[in-house]
Amino acid sequence: MPLDMNELFAANFSISTIAADKARKLKRDLGFDHNYEIARLAMGLSLGQERYPDNVGTGSSGSIRGNILFGKDDYPLWVGVLLTNYLQFHPDDEESVSISLLQAVVRAHWDNGVRIMADLWEQCDEDENKFWIKLVRSYADLPDVVQHEVSGSGTVSPSYSPGAVRLVLGHVLRKNGETGDEFAHDVNGEGYAPHIAIMGQAGSGKTRVMTHILQQMKKQAQCPVILVDLGKGDLGRNDALIQSLGATVLSVPEQPIPLDMFHVADMSDTNLTTAAMENFRDAFAQVAGKLGPKQSDNIAEALLPLFRSQQRITFQKIKETVDAFYADHGLSKDSVVSTVNSLTLRELFRPELSPDEFFGKSWVITFANARTEVKTFAVCLLLSALDFYLKRQPEAALDTDGYRSLHLVLAIDEARELLGMNHVGLANNIRLHRSKGLSVILVSQSPDDYDGKKDDYLENISLPLCLKTNAASPRSLKNMFKGDVNFASLQPGTCYSVDARASRPVLLKLQFDN
């Protein structure tokens, strides 16, 4: 008999107690936001097996309602595939199709898929990069070229093709002063993150190094580049760089960032709308300081109805909503209200472009004339929006040599203050999204900028480049360069990096003419 959609959406689907424990661990270790994401991946893996799973565990846990598990738009596909798979192995049960049967089928595949993922995670020594590579190679048949559709625009961005993105940076400088072999680094190679840290005191040439790297990556990967200038705004006046990146320059707050910051594809998904509101609250807390429990609850109570009922939300609308909430509840104005009022004096974001459209273009975003709190708030929101967007994107393609295609480069100049904020958006973009084709470049004045931070970004930096600096922290130096080096004595045009193959520091003579 046909399944009733309302009954399907209201039904609860669960897995065994043991599988639920494994799923929770995988969700945490792999950086997923929602249980249904793990569930869908698990079911997909199990459906690809040659036999029907019959080793379902006991107990019941991890319940998810049907509307969340399958999604409003995708439920016909999921239900069709699940039941077709079941009937392939049980052809005599065709007349017994029901919600209860579907619940049993989901449980079987969900359980089995979680078991596959947990075993694979263990085989990969709980290394995220190894896990995704092995998962894709073992269970997916991906094309060599991925076409990225931009929703709502009717256009298609450039194709992203796997293959080595190789940075040529100069030559190894020998102890006798002679130059040796060419030093090159494959940004997107197998087994390490595609992230770069460039350090050097003012006047050392670090900006030139960053510019050289960005131009090479843009030319080879043909992917968008977002360059955030947290310094004096000089990069927004570098015509040669802007032209080579094909970028549009934005000077905030004079020019609002044309991004729909709180875009949610499915407004009926309360998990997504709640997450969008929480992104705002997290960025807001970076400016307002530590929020008390009551203040945090007030923000959520005030804004959740707005985020669940409207799209293309403006900051002015947020201000009006907060003001109305405080007035309606007889609350005295506090730091929440005053900070909201301060941040909405100028229009920082204008919800014109969807995340697909915005992150599919190249931008140079400067904050030369922005107040510190405005700059902090805008950057934190931008990073949170990128994190939110990438979590919902497919994995970037891998070629047969393990090179993952780059889909976006994010470069942050003068990143010192941002590194000290322990912002979850920055941490997630660095730790979680290399599999989505994101490369992050951090430019600051010293390795000391990374020392003592809650998030150890250095663990995810595969290419450190340090020019002349008076860095003093033995911890950061030891972690990054795996040996004793003297940055203060470096001459112009030279820097230290790390030979990944030998795990030792190398002295480089930089070269910028190619």
Image (tube, rainbow, N blue to C red):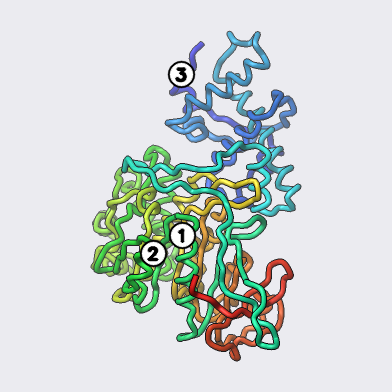
Q: Is residue 90 visible?
A: yes
* First along the sequence among labels 2 and 3: 3
Residue 108, given in percent of the width and then of the height, sits at 66, 27
Amino acid type for the residue under numbered disc 3: Asp
Instruction: Please tell me which residue lies in front, 478 or 34.
Output: 478
Q: Are marks 1 and 2 in contact (CB under 8 Å)?
A: yes
Residue 39, given in percent of the width and then of the height, sits at 59, 37
Q: Is residue 421 visible?
A: no
* First along the sequence among labels 1 and 3: 3
Residue occupying the point 37% across, 66% down: 377
Residue occupying the point 50% across, 43% down: 146
Q: Which residue is mark 3?
A: 4
Q: Residues within 10 Å of mark 1 (few under 14, many from 20)?
A: few
Q: Is residue 280 left or right of residue 43?
A: left
Task: Give the structural element (helix, strand or loop) at label 1.
Answer: helix
Residue 514, given in percent of the width and then of the height, sits at 50, 70
Q: Is residue 462 above or below residue 144?
A: below
Q: Which residue is mark 2?
A: 244
Q: Which residue is mark 1?
A: 219
Q: Are marks 1 and 3 in contact (CB under 8 Å)?
A: no
* First along the sequence among labels 1 and 2: 1
Mark 1 or 3: the one toward you:
1
Q: Residues within 10 Å of mark 2 (few under 14, many from 20)?
A: some
Amino acid type for the residue under numbered disc 2: Ser
Which of the 4 quarters of the picture holds residue 505? bottom right
Q: Residues within 10 Å of mark 3 (few under 14, many from 20)?
A: few
Amino acid type for the residue under numbered disc 1: Lys
Label ID, residue 70: none
Task: Give the structural element (helix, strand or loop) at label 2.
Answer: helix
